[in-house]
Image (spheres, rainbow, N blue to C red):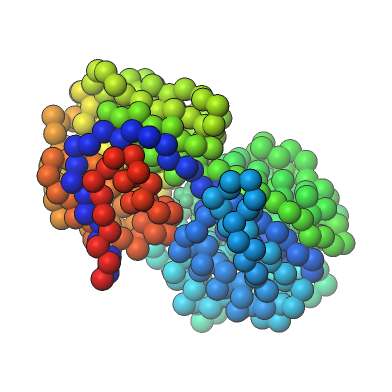
Amino acid sequence: MDQIVIKGGKPLNGTIPIGGAKNAALPLMAASLLSDDVLRLSNLPHLADISTMTHLLNEMGVNISMEGDAPGGHMGKVFALDASGVKETTAPYDLVRRMRASVLVLGPLVAKHGHARVSLPGGCAIGTRPVDLHLKALEALGAEIELSEGYVEAKAPKGLVGGHVLFSNVTVGGTENILMAACLAKGETTISNAAREPEVSDLAHCLVAMGAKIEGIGTDTLKVQGVERLHGADYEVIVDRIEMGSYAVAAAVTGGDVVLKGGRIDLIEAVVDVMREAGVEIEEVEDGLRVSRKNGAIKGFDVMTEPYAGFPTDMQAQMMVLASVAEGASMITETIFENRFMHVPELVRMGADINVHGRSAIVRGVQKLSGAQVMATDLRASSSLVLAGLVAEGETVINRVYHLDRGYERLEEKLAACGADIERIRE
Ligand code: UD1
């Protein structure tokens, strides 16, 4: 298994291009199942999760051709997805186990083909993460759901019928699944307490480009008028706010000065507010965001993760690194996932002073972190270890790098281009 080796202590200076959002790209790819025409997606990041979704859709009979990089200097890939030949409506355990987001094929398949069989994702490193809300929502549109042999079987032989879906908890994937399904249901669907994450809105905009009728995009109430069919479209994936936030912390924690090319403040306002409060300078520049910390120490801060527009759970681990080297104490509270502090013992091994009490972590800033052998456990936990390695004295060796490859494209190249001493050891 590959390792990443970092010799810390170098401020980052330069430009980092930010790619398309993985969490937008995955539902957009699943949306291709709703149409018999070609959906052309551009600015797709080159990541392991995108390959897993490609594999899953391929197995169902979606023809995916790669059309190279987008013109105009885009970094991202362009895929043309043609689902006109779909024969298979099963998502097997082997792929769903690797990537929970595979469950996003459920809504489109049952809406378009009247049938879907999708493996239950099972446990996962950051909590139990059930799909009960996805299933309840589909039932509200008339799907018959059965669970057997570890699979969800959803049927709607006469098609789905619009209805009222009220989510008891904000769920990003659940909102995306039911939004896609509702586009082809008969009549009107109202989705209340819908997730407002930018990736949900990105999906909604793409569905509209495919002919869907959706009102309330960006709010917590989505109204969908079902249509007979959706057509093809050309759509560019939104920028990855979590990649952007992660590199913003990298610049801040190393006392660097970095332009995040393609970055947008409006997508990470909650993160920007906390970072500014901590003493990090963030400004909009012509081609993105500039993040710098030239003078002065970082000040402690409090963070609580919440659904969008609150502070994103996917930035919690990275902010903990900033808190670890801040002056004074910080409190970081995780309200979205029950088991999302797995990075804590690894950061403590690097010299951080962190105590977890239930859902909250008290972080007392230390003068310095020191390099160590550490283990990546999930995607964002891994990126926090990279950030800690960048600021730590000495050498940090990160094992199980495949977690990072699920969500960060060319991470070591992007950081090395800004002066980090980082390399991947391939096995
Ligand atoms: C998505 C993101 C993930 C992010 C998360 C929260 C993708 C591919 N992944 O995950 O990076 O961390 O949003 O912003 O976009 N829940 C239930 N029942 C359900 C569904 C969810 O209890 O049926 C719970 C979950 O266990 C969790 C909470 O609701 O505690 C939020 O989960 P959800 O928003 O659904 O996360 P994902 O869509 O899986």
Q: Is residue 170 above or below residue 405?
A: above
> How far across and down, in percent of the image, does residue 125 sit?
35, 60
Residue 340 in the image: above or below residue 29: above
Q: Can residue 326 be seen in this view?
A: yes
Q: Where is residue 269 in the image (x, y as percent from the top left)?
A: 50, 28
Quarter of the figure with residue 40: bottom right
The residue closer to the viewer here, 291 or 365, is 291
Q: In which quarter of the image is residue 56?
A: bottom right
Q: Position of residue 295 (x, y in %)?
A: 26, 18
Q: Which residue is drawn at 15% across and 31% down?
A: 366
Query: How many numbered markers are drawn?
Result: 0
Residue drawn at x 54%, y 50% as measured from the top left: 75
Q: Tell me which residue sits at (49%, 73%) in the image.
A: 95
Foreground pick, 37 / 222: 37
Q: Is residue 97 left or right of residue 209?
A: left
Q: Which residue is drawn at 57% across and 69% down?
A: 54
Residue with the most extreme top position: 296
Is residue 360 in view?
no
372 left or right of 224 in image: left
The quadrant in which the N terminus is found is: bottom left
Query: Which quadrant holds the C terminus?
Result: bottom left
User: Residue 20's x, y, as percent?
Assistant: 55, 49
Give whichever of 192, 88 is nearer the camera.
88
Residue 280 in the figure: left or right of residue 391: right
